[in-house]
Image (cartoon, grey):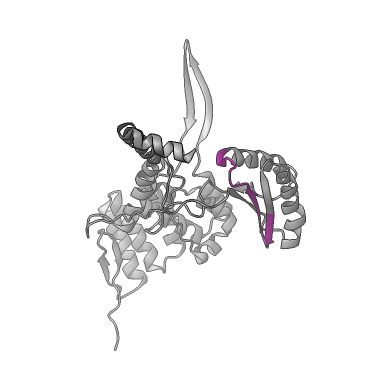
Amino acid sequence: MIRRILSASFGKPVLTLLLALAAAAGGGVWLGDLKRDVFPDLATPVFSVFVQNPAMGAEELETGVAIPLEVALAGLPEVRRIRSSSQAGVAQVRAEFEPDADYYLARQLVTERVNQAARDLPPGTGAPLVSSLTGRLNEVMEVVLEAKPGTAGLMELRDLADYELRNRLLGVPGVAAVEVLGGHLRQFQIQLDPDRMAALGVSLNEVMTAVKRSNENAAGGFVVQGSIEWTVRAVGRAENMGDLRATVSLLETAVARAPTVETHWALGALYLELGAAGAAEAQLRVAAEGDPGSADRWIALANALALKPDPLAAADALERARSAEPGLHVTRDPAGRLMRQPSPPTH
């Protein structure tokens, strides 16, 4: 057979050459369509389920969370291995599938089974979290966001990365996840004064409740005018620091509950910071007349009167401050408000 092929090939060399060239061309086309990678993904589809319950220990999480999830995931098609690990407050269940299993179908099946098992988990357990489709050998690209000195700070760069760059990268086909690291996360902080809170009789829970209630929207129903229906909505979300400073209902409640000199002083100082001259004057006058020997309260009252403006009454309050503390020296801060002049350093 081989001898015949060789004899025919030598007998018709042109046809043999054409067949060889056609075979080489076909092989080149097939080679171009062949999937290849320098670092092929050898990882099998593995999904991790994380469940948190801060009140439970490792043994309780093992029996109450990990084992029910293992039983729920054990019957999935093409599952090779299921493992779990538990520690104080956190349980992790790992489901490993066959190498040729479809990622998206496997994750869908895992999510469905986990949602069914979540109904029977112990009270206080957080919602189970299923890991994403990212593999251990997937490509990772790092992007550094920089700015010229003086053009943008770390907080502005973090805002740009969180709300602009991250959203655009997630829209690129093939991108599974985007993590943002570094920079300063924008946040509003409320610094509490324990001494003033103790004077007002206000607890930490009351402050947290007041801030939470003052930072939310509410639905108000509808108003119908003929064929037009208007939506009524109360917008109370804090958008800046001024909105948070305007949360004075808690102090007003404290003044009504315990109208002492200290409560009037605290509420008046807050009104003065907000620029409410009339309300600040009313509260600070009660505080100053209740403690006439405090020069600082008369100075604060003078600032409130100057803000109205009432220069004569402000001058009178400043004179009362000097009478309360002979030798008092008053200056102005960068904002133009009156303040006690700091004493020179002693050596």
Q: Is residue 132 above or below residue 230?
A: below
Q: Residue 60: image x %, image y %?
A: 76, 58
Q: Residue 304: image x %, image y %?
A: 34, 54
Q: Is residue 82 above or below residue 100?
A: below
Name the residue: 25% across, 54% down. Answer: 311
Count of numbered circles in the view? 0
Q: Residue 152: image x %, image y %?
A: 26, 55
Q: Which residue is situated farthest in the bottom direction here?
A: 347
Q: Closer to the camera, 287 or 121?
A: 121
Residue 67: within the magenta? no
Magenta span covers which residues?
83-104
| Residue 29 in view of the camera | no
Residue 102: within the magenta? yes
Q: Which residue is situated farthest in the top direction here?
A: 226
Q: Going by the image, does 269 lie left or right of 65?
A: left
Q: Closer to the camera, 161 or 276?
A: 161
Name the residue: 32% across, 56% down. Answer: 144
Q: Closer to the camera, 100 or 131?
A: 100
| Residue 144 in view of the camera | yes
Q: Going by the image, does 199 lie left or right of 34?
A: right
Q: Going by the image, does 200 lie left or right of 57?
A: left
Q: Which residue is situated farthest in the right direction here?
A: 63
Name the residue: 58% across, 43% down. Answer: 100
Assign the C terminus to one quadrant of the image: bottom left
Q: Residue 94: image x %, image y %?
A: 64, 53
